[in-house]
C-alpha cells in the first residue's frame, strides 16, 4: 500500500468554519465551492451569507449554525472515533475529486489507507436470493485478494454480503444518514467491524441525521464516485441499484452486471443493464480484465477549491442581470452554458447570480451542472 500523498491540511478553525458553512440551509457542494472561490475562505463567506441571500430574493434569512454547534458535532465525531476530512486532504477518497460537485467535507471512521487502493463498488437487491448473496460475497473476496477495496452502501442483502466478503482485505461503507445512524440499524456492528479491520465508514450527512428516502440517491452517488467500476448483483427494474449504475455511467465509471434468470424479477435490472452495454460478470476475472488498464489511475491531485481569477475580479451582479438570468430559468433543468448564450452575460456574473439564487432557495442544482427554478419561488 502506498504512503499517503502530501496535501494541504485544514486548521482546526478552518475545519469548524467549513462545517458551519456546509450545515447552513441551502448551502450544498456547488454553492460551497462558489462561496470559497468568491471570498477565499469559509470565514468570510459566512459573514457574507445574509447579504447574498437578500440579493437572491430570499423571503427570510436562514440561520447560520453557531460555532458551538460545529464544535459539538466535531466532539461527537471524536467520541465516535471518527474525523472530518476536507477535499484536498490526504485521507479524502481520491476518485471523488473527479465527480461533479464532490462533498467538501466527509465524516470518516476507520483507516484512510483503504482509499489509496483501487476500488470497485458492488451493489444489488436488499431481498437478494441465496445465490445472489453467495455471488456478491465471492466477488468481493476475490477482488480483495487481488488488491481492490470494495465499496458498498451497507444495505441489507447484496451490500452486506459484499462488505463481509471483503472485510479482511478492506471495504468502504457509505451511509445515507449520519455516521452515528447506521441504516439498517442491525448493521451497526458491521460498521464497527469494517473500521476495526482496516476499512472505513463514510458519510456526508450531519451527525444525528436519520436517513430519509431522498438521502439514498446521494449515498449512491458517493458509492459510484469512489470506485473505478460498479457491479450490480441482482436488481429489480425499479431499484436504487440501477440509480447507482446510471450515476456510475454518467461519471465515466465502468458498469458491470451479473446475469440472472428472466423468470426472476430480481434479475430484470441486471439483464436490462447487459442489453444496454454493461459488461457481463460471472467471475471476478471479468472485472479484473476490464479494470486492469485503469487500476493504477488516481484522480487529479488539485482537488481543493481553487478560485478562478475572473470570479474574484467581477463586481456583484445588478438587478437587471439577475432579472435576465431568472427569465431564462424554469422548472426544466437548463445548462449554465445555455444561460450564458441566452443572456450574453459572462460566466462569472452568471455564477454569482446562481449562487445568490441557490442560497435563497430559489433554484435546484442537477447532475452535469444543470439548474432549474424551484416551483413557486420565481
Image: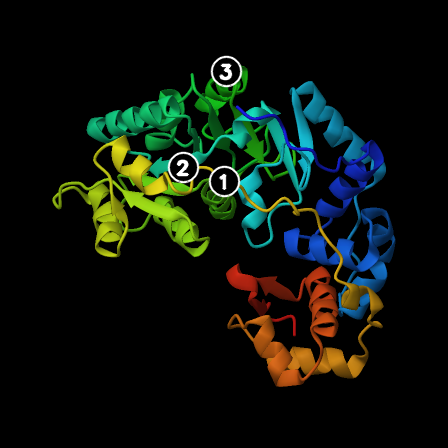
User: Quadrant of residue 370 in the image?
Assistant: bottom right
Answer with mark 2 or mark 3, whichever residue precedes in sequence: 2
Q: Is residue 105 above or below residue 365?
A: above
Numbered circle sitting on residue 121: 2
In this picture, residue 302 sits left or right of residue 252: right
Q: Position of residue 361 (x, y in %)?
A: 68, 62
Numbered circle sitting on residue 131: none
Look at 45% across and 40% down and name the residue there: 227
- State the CA–CA distance, disc 1 to disc 3: 19 Å
Q: Is residue 161 above or below residue 344?
A: above
Asked if one can make out residue 125 in the rendered structure from this viewpoint, the answer is no
As helix, strand or loop, the secondary structure at mark 3 comes to loop
Mark 2 closeness class: few <14, some 14–19, many ≥20 residues within 10 Å: many
Q: How is the image coloured?
A: rainbow
As helix, strand or loop, the secondary structure at mark 1 comes to loop
The answer to whether marks 2 and 3 mark residues whose Cβ atoms lie closer than 8 Å is: no
Mark 1 closeness class: few <14, some 14–19, many ≥20 residues within 10 Å: many
- State the CA–CA distance, disc 2 to disc 1: 8 Å
Q: Is residue 170 above or below residue 363?
A: above
Answer with mark 2 or mark 1, whichever residue precedes in sequence: 2
Answer with mark 1 or mark 3, whichever residue precedes in sequence: 3
- State the CA–CA distance, disc 2 to disc 3: 18 Å
According to the picture, the residue beneath numbered tag 1 turns out to be 226
Look at 77% across and 53% down and name the residue there: 36
In this picture, residue 328 sits left or right of residue 127: right
The answer to whether marks 1 and 3 mark residues whose Cβ atoms lie closer than 8 Å is: no
Mark 3 closeness class: few <14, some 14–19, many ≥20 residues within 10 Å: some
Towards the viewer: 175 or 135: 135
Amino acid at each position: 500500500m502506498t504512503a499517503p500523498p502530501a496535501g494541504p491540511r485544514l486548521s482546526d478553525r478552518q475545519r469548524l468554519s467549513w462545517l458551519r458553512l456546509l450545515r447552513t440551509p441551502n448551502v450544498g457542494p456547488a454553492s460551497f465551492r462558489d462561496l470559497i472561490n468568491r471570498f477565499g475562505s469559509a470565514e468570510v463567506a459566512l459573514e457574507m451569507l445574509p447579504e447574498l441571500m437578500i440579493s437572491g430574493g430570499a423571503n427570510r434569512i436562514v440561520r447560520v449554525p453557531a460555532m458551538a454547534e460545529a464544535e459539538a458535532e466535531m466532539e461527537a465525531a471524536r467520541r465516535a472515533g471518527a474525523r472530518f476530512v476536507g477535499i484536498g486532504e490526504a485521507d479524502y477518497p481520491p476518485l471523488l475529486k473527479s465527480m461533479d460537485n464532490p462533498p467538501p467535507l466527509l465524516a470518516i471512521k476507520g483507516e484512510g489507507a483503504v482509499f489509496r487502493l483501487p476500488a470497485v463498488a458492488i451493489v444489488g437487491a436488499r431481498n437478494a436470493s441465496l445465490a445472489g448473496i453467495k455471488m456478491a460475497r465471492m466477488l468481493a473476496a476475490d477482488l480483495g485478494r487481488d488488491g481492490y477495496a470494495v465499496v458498498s452502501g451497507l444495505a441489507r442483502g447484496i451490500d452486506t454480503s459484499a462488505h463481509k466478503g471483503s472485510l479482511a482485505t478492506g471495504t468502504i461503507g457509505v451511509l445515507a444518514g449520519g455516521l452515528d445512524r447506521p441504516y439498517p440499524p442491525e448493521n451497526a456492528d458491521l460498521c464497527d467491524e469494517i473500521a476495526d479491520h482496516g476499512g472505513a465508514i463514510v458519510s456526508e450527512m450531519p451527525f444525528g441525521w436519520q436517513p430519509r428516502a431522498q438521502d439514498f440517491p446521494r449515498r449512491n452517488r458517493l458509492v459510484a464516485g469512489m470506485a473505478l467500476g460498479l457491479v450490480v448483483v441482482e436488481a429489480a427494474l425499479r431499484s436504487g441499484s440501477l440509480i447507482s449504475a446510471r450515476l456510475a455511467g454518467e461519471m465515466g465509471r465502468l458498469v458491470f452486471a451479473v446475469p440472472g434468470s428472466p423468470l426472476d424479477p430480481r434479475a430484470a435490472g441486471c439483464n436490462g443493464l447487459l442489453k444496454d452495454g454493461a459488461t457481463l460478470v460471472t467471475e471476478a476475472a471479468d472485472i479484473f480484465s476490464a479494470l486492469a488498464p485503469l487500476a493504477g489511475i488516481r484522480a487529479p491531485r488539485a482537488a481543493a477549491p481553487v478560485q478562478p481569477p475572473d470570479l474574484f475580479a467581477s463586481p456583484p451582479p445588478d438587478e437587471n442581470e439577475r432579472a435576465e438570468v431568472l427569465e431564462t430559468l424554469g422548472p426544466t433543468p437548463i445548462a449554465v452554458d445555455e444561460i450564458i448564450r441566452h443572456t450574453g452575460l459572462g460566466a462569472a456574473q452568471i455564477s454569482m447570480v446562481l449562487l445568490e439564487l441557490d442560497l435563497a432557495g430559489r433554484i435546484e442544482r442537477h447532475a452535469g451542472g444543470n439548474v432549474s427554478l424551484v416551483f413557486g419561488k420565481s
